[in-house]
Image: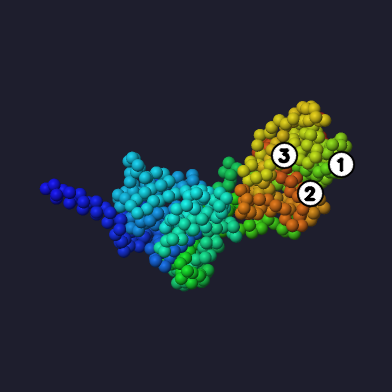
Amino acid sequence: MANNAAIVRLNRVVAKAMAGMLPPDDLTVTEWAERNRRLSAESAAEPGPWRTERTPYLREPMNAWTDPKVRHIVMVAASQVGKSEFLNNCIGYVIDQDPGSILFIHPTTIDAKEYSKLRIAPMIRDCPTLRAKVSDPKSRDSGNTILQKTYPGGILTMCGSTEAHALASKPIRYVLGDERDRWALSAGNEGDPWGLAMARQTTFYNAKSGEVSTPTVKNASAIEASYATGTMERWKSRCPHCGEYHEIRWADIRFDYDEKLIAGNKTYKVRDIYYICPGCGCISTELEMKHAPARWEADNPDAYEQGTRSFWLNAFVSQWASWESIILKYLEAIGNSRKMQVVYNTCFGELWEDRGDLQDEDSLMARREEYHAELPDGVLVLTAGVDTQDDRMEYEIIGHGHFGETWGIEKGLIMGRPDDDATWTKLDEMVFDRVLHFENGIGLKMSMSFVDEGGHFTQDVRLRCRERIGKKVFCIKGMSGPDKPYTAPPKQMKIVVKGRTVGKCWQYQLGVDAGKQIIMDNLAVQTPGSKYCHFPRRDDYGSAYFAGLLSERLVYKQNKRQPWQWEKIPGHERNEVLDCRNYAMAAFKALPADLDKIDRKLKEMSGARRERVATPSVIAPAAKPQVRQKNRALERYYDDW
C-alpha cells in the first residue's frame, strides 16, 4: 500500500511537469476565447461568455496571432470597438495554450497598474482555465502581483514605456503594446521603447508582437508608421444596393439636426441619419450597414510574406457606439479644435491633421463689413488689449455680445515710450476714457483693459496701471504652455522704482496659448452668431492687421515634453495684433458681466430715446425733466462701462 501511495504521488509530480511540456491544442485565439473566455462585469458592457459574432472584425486580428507566418500585428482602432479584448484574448491564449514570457507595455506605469487591476485580474478570476494556472494573489510567495503574473512556462510583466530597465534586460518571446501613440519618445536615455522591446525577441524563432493604439496626429503617429509596414487592411461593409465593399467613413454619413439654446448653452437633437454609398450613391440606414456582410481588405497584401499584418478600424461599425452618439460628439466639438481632435481620433478613427483650418488673410479681408456707427448692434461690452513695445503701445478695442460673438472696433497704436507720461495720457484719451457710440447715440466705455507688462518697462507699466485701477486697467503677464489656464485670479505684485518698493498693483497671469486657440477656433466660424468674429471695412483692419492676426500656428513637435507648440509662420514675424486681441479677449473672460442685464438696459434706454423723439411738443413741460433725468442717469451708467 505504501508503495502504491508513493507511485501515485510520483505520477502527480510527473504529470505536473509534463503538463508544461505538452504541445498546445490546435486552437486559434478566436476558438480559445469562445471556449474559455468570460467577460468580466468590471470591464465589459456585456459580461458573460465571449461571442466573436459581437465583434466579427476582431476574428482576423486574433487568428493572426496563431498564424505561424505572422510575427507582428498592428491594430489602429477607435474607441468602443473592443481593441483591448484583442490584447486580453491573446494574453489568455498564451497563458493557457502556448506559454512563454510576455512583456506588456503601456504609456506609463500608472496605466499599467490600472489595466492590470481593471482588466487582467478580472479576466484571470473569471476564466477557470486561467485561474487554475495563475496563482492566487493572496497566497504567500504567489508570484502574482499587480505588475507581474507568473504561470507555468512564463511570466506576464507589465510596465510603462519610460522604464528602460524593464525593456532592455531579459529575453522575451511575446511583446504587446497598448496605446502606442501615447508612449514616451525615449525610455530614459536609451532610445525608442518599442525598439528596445523588439531587441529582446531576437533569440526566439517563434516570437510574436502586437501593438494597438487609437490614432493621434498625422505624420507624428507611431501607430500610423507601424501600420504602413503591414498589410494595411481596412474593414469594409457591403452596400445592400450595389454589393460593393466600402469602409464606412465620416464623409459618407449624412444627418439633419435641430439646435436649441437652453440657459445660454447649445443643445442638439439629431435626426434622419443615413449612409451614402460612395460607389452607387444609394442610401442605407445604420441598422442595415451594421448587419451587412463585411470583410478585411488589404491595400498592401505582400506585407504578409514579411510577417506583418496591420488593421485599421473606426467606431462606425461598433455595436456599442451609435451613429447618433458620434454625431452629437461632433456637433458639441465644433469650434473647439482640441475636442474635435478627440472626436476624429476616438470616433472617426482618423488621424488629426494640422490642416491649416485657420482662415487665410484674403478670406478674412473679404468678409469685412460696414459698421453704420462706432458700435454695431449686438455689442454689449467693450474691452481693450494693449501690447507694450519699447517705442510704442499697440491696442485693439473689441466689442462682445452674446454667446462669444465679437466685433473688432478699433486697432491702433500710440507712438512713445512706455515710461513717458504723454504716452499714457494719449492711451487714456484713445482707449481707457474713450466713449464709443451706437447709431442711436448711446455710448459705452471700456469695461476692462489689459496691458502687457513684458519687455523693458515692467515696473513703469505696473505703476501706471495702479494709477488707473479706477478705470479697470490691469497689467498682465503672458504664460505659455498648454497647461496654463486662460485667466486666473489676479495677484498683487510689487512695484519697484530705482531699487525701492513704492507699492503694489494687481497683475493677471494669462495662459496665452489657450487664448490663441480660442481666437483661431473662433476665426474658423463662418456664420454670424455664436463665436463669430466681425471686422469693419476700414484701413485699420487691412491686410497688415490680418497678417498679424494669423502670424502664429499650432504645430506638433514630437521631441518636446509638451509637443503642441505655437510658432510664428514664416513671413509673419509681427504678432502684436494677435497679442492685443488675446489680451482683450482675456479681459472679457475675467470680467463678471451680466450680459442679459446689460442687454435689457440698452433696450430700455433705446426705447426711452425713441419715446422722447416721438413725443409732441405740446406735452406738459413737467413731464420733460423726468424723461431727460432718466436718460441722463442711464447714459452715465453706460458711459461707466
Which percent across, then down, holds residue 121? 38, 46
Residue 72 seen by the camera: yes
Q: Does residue 207 appear left or right of residue 161 in this picture?
A: left
Of residues 65 and 411, the one nearer the viewer is: 65
Crowding at label 2, few (<14), some or many (≥20) Cα neighbours within 10 Å? few
Q: How packed is label 1: few (under 14 Cα within 10 Å), some, or many (20 or more)?
A: some
At x 41%, y 47%, the residue is: 148
Tag 3: amino acid: Lys
Real-space Cα separation, disc 3 to disc 2, in angstroms: 36 Å
Whether 39 is drawn above or below 250: the answer is above
**How has the structure been colored for display?**
rainbow
Q: Position of residue 103 (x, y in %)?
A: 44, 53
Labels 1 & 3 near each other (Cβ < 8 A):
no
According to the image, label 3 marks what residue?
Answer: 477
Label 2: which secondary element: loop
Q: Residue at x 86, y 41 (%)?
A: 416
Q: CA distance from mark 1 to mark 3?
A: 21 Å
**Residue, disc 1:** 416
At horizontal 47% and vertical 69% (from top left) the residue drawn is 306
Q: Secondary structure at mark 3?
A: strand
Q: Residue 372's mark?
A: 2
281 to 384, vertically: above or below? below
Q: In the rendered image, which quarter contains the C terminus?
A: top right
